[in-house]
Amino acid sequence: MSWSAETIKRAHDIVARYPEPRSAVMPLLYLAMRQDGYLTADGMKQVADLVGITPAQVQSVATFYVMFKTEPKGKYLISMCTSISCYLMGADDVLHAIEEASGVPAGEADDEIGVEHAECIGACGGAPACLVNYELIEGLTVEKAKELVRWLRDGKPETINGDELQTLFGSVTSFDWAIKEDNAAIGPYPAFPVFGTAAQNTDALEPGRGA
Amino acid sequence: MVYPLVVTKRMMEHPADSHTMKRYEATGGYVAARQSVGQTREELVELVKASGLLGRGGAAFSAGLKWSFLAPARPAYLVVNGDESEPGTFKDRQLMERDPHQIVEGMIIAAKANEVHDSFVYIRGEYPKPARRLQQAVADAYAKGYLGKGIFGTDYDLELTVHLGAGAYICGEETALLNSLEGRRGEPRIKPPYFPAAKGLYMKPTIVNNIETISNLPHIINQGSEWFAGLSDSADTGTFMMSISGHVNKPGNYELPHGLTWREVIYDVAGGIRNGNELKAWVPGGASAPWFVPELHLDRPVTKEACAADGSMLGSGAIIVMDHTTDMVGAAERLVAFFAEESCGQCTPCREGTTWLDMILQRVLNGAGRDADIDLLLDVADNISVGLGWPPKQTTICPLGPSAVSPVMSLVRHFRDEVEAHIASAPHSGGQGVAVSIRGIA
Ligand SMILES: Cc1cc2nc3c(=O)[nH]c(=O)nc-3n(C[C@H](O)[C@H](O)[C@H](O)COP(=O)(O)O)c2cc1C
Ligand code: SF4
Ligand code: FES
């Protein structure tokens, strides 16, 4: 998908935040994922042009990081932590339940749901934990994980809000989340207003250096 | 027991709005930053040196000393490490979500102390919520004139950019982080140069500090280095954050004084073992730390010095507790698998060695272990870290590879009988084993 004038402007604003343009590669790759749902060859070419390096250089960066997806991952990406603390609290069973309920084996995706195992997601006090489009659920169980998959399949939510997920499917947390948040994810990439990748991008887009 | 709180005090007292500018300023916020903008580099560096503050990112290096090493070339940069990915660690997430202004204020102080006009926070990509909170705080600080051109009405300029990673543990290693921030693959740099303070971001002098380290700074400015040093009897001053997870009744983050015993931490602070089970072992300082066991370590003090004397470390402050139902081969496999997955691939001992260690542990777990597998594990481990000592010798560019040796050594040292039992239960333990992935990864 070719980028709108607004997206190009956002990209330039992001580049202007850094002392050297190349530093903007990672934020711009998120912008590219927002465009197409994942990283296409066109998206990476666009990023290369914006920061003045070659598409091959962009690709070498993109393929280093697990969150840059060069294949479609559906609308909802479930990343189930299987690292030590979650493993100790039964993460493997939860992952199997997600795979069974969704019919999607870890590492794969259908049009709607992607499933993957993740290394520690920093929610070990609320183990076992997973991310849906990088919004967190702590204190999962096998039953709740199945409900989560049904909720995604049947409800097809437009946006994914962490507080809602935690209320519906979570239990014990690593610490008191305390403050509710309205913002939400809109695809299988992190929701961050500066990148225009969140439901509400009414920024906090603080101008900083670019201004 | 009630312990003195420093970095978590505000969020504990004001859970509903500790993240807002309003609450932050109503509780003494930005007084320290305003003051330090009028102070010299020498004054600030001396103050932080005298406080004894050690880095909280794992290496426990003196913050003031690191600052004093900053090379004279300019521009210099400040990069705050919010990559927090060490299994078991989740303290920086809480600090970012619940008290983001404390980080912004700490960064203003660190920037002024190091004559920095351009600063960055690198937050792991899996932390969009902490990043949103911090970004909001940054925007609020810009709006108030605490960041940007001429901060606090002085002629000092300071920019602060929140940067997101994209899923790579190794970017927590500071030179990998700098490569990543430059828009490159997050591969650790070959040393020398040894310190980013000499050659860091864009090969310019750069200070890299952890989120918790930075969060302490406003308090040191406000209450003085003597007060901070006086919070502890250890050479490690102030308080420290511990992330406790695993089979305890009350997992969570706890800000603690130095020098409690492990018994106090596990049974009093964390509420003891679930279901009244028996404690089997714990990881004292993140996945890279050799394990402790109750027979030897339960009444030892939780200090940097005591852990080092016992052949382990406090590292990132992550304690992972395992009860008697834990299959220790399974636990070791999971820890090793982490390093195998996260190896950046530059060094052969790390890339190949961690993968082999994991495959051998998997086959032992899956009933296909061979009699020679313990020796093989030790042999492979010895190729990654020669001599298998502590602290581990390094054959690699960064310490990630040698970190994978810790769980293997801990397993063989304390639970060799369990490994042998797994192997003995294999139908053909003398024959060819088959490594089978249990998580759908190759
Ligand atoms: C493999 C590896 C991973 C690391 N991960 C982190 C991390 O996630 N967060 C962090 O602050 N430091 C991490 N560190 C330590 C950093 O390299 C660096 O020492 C630290 O950020 C400096 O800040 P401090 O002096 O305030 O602790 C890691 C080091 C290594 C070798
Ligand atoms: S030790 Fe491992 S992670 Fe570190 S540089 Fe070498 S290959 Fe990369
Ligand atoms: S081990 Fe699963 S969140 Fe840390």
Image: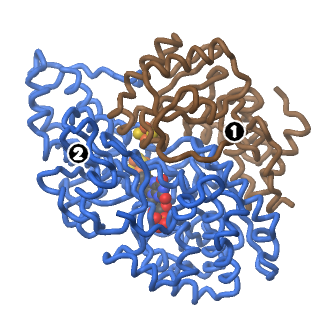
Chain colours: A brown, B blue
Q: Residues at marks 2 and 1, common chain?
A: no
Please tell me whether mark 2 or mark 1 is closer to you in this view. Answer: 1
The label shown at residue A191 is: 1
Q: Is residue B278 above or below residue B111?
A: above
Q: Which of A30 and B74 is in front in this view?
A: A30
Left or right, B179 with respect to A207, comes to: left
Instruction: Answer whether residue B42 is visible to the viewer in this image.
Output: yes
Q: In this view, does B303 lie above or below A136?
A: below
Residue shown at 25%/45% (left/top)?
A: B407
Q: In this view, does B310 lie above or below A113?
A: below
Instruction: Give coordinates of residue B90: x percent, y percent.
Output: 47, 49
| Residue reaching furthest to the right | A5
Left or right, B191 with respect to A51, comes to: left
For the residue marked with disc 2, what is the amino acid? Ala
- The answer to which image quadrant residue B426 occupies is top left
Chain where mark 1 sits: A
Instruction: Identify the residue position indicated by label 2 in the image.
Output: B381
- Quadrant in which the C terminus of chain B is drawn: top left
Instruction: Give coordinates of residue A40: x percent, y percent.
Output: 71, 27
Instruction: Give coordinates of residue A17: x percent, y percent.
Output: 77, 57
Residue shown at 81%/45% (left/top)?
A: A11
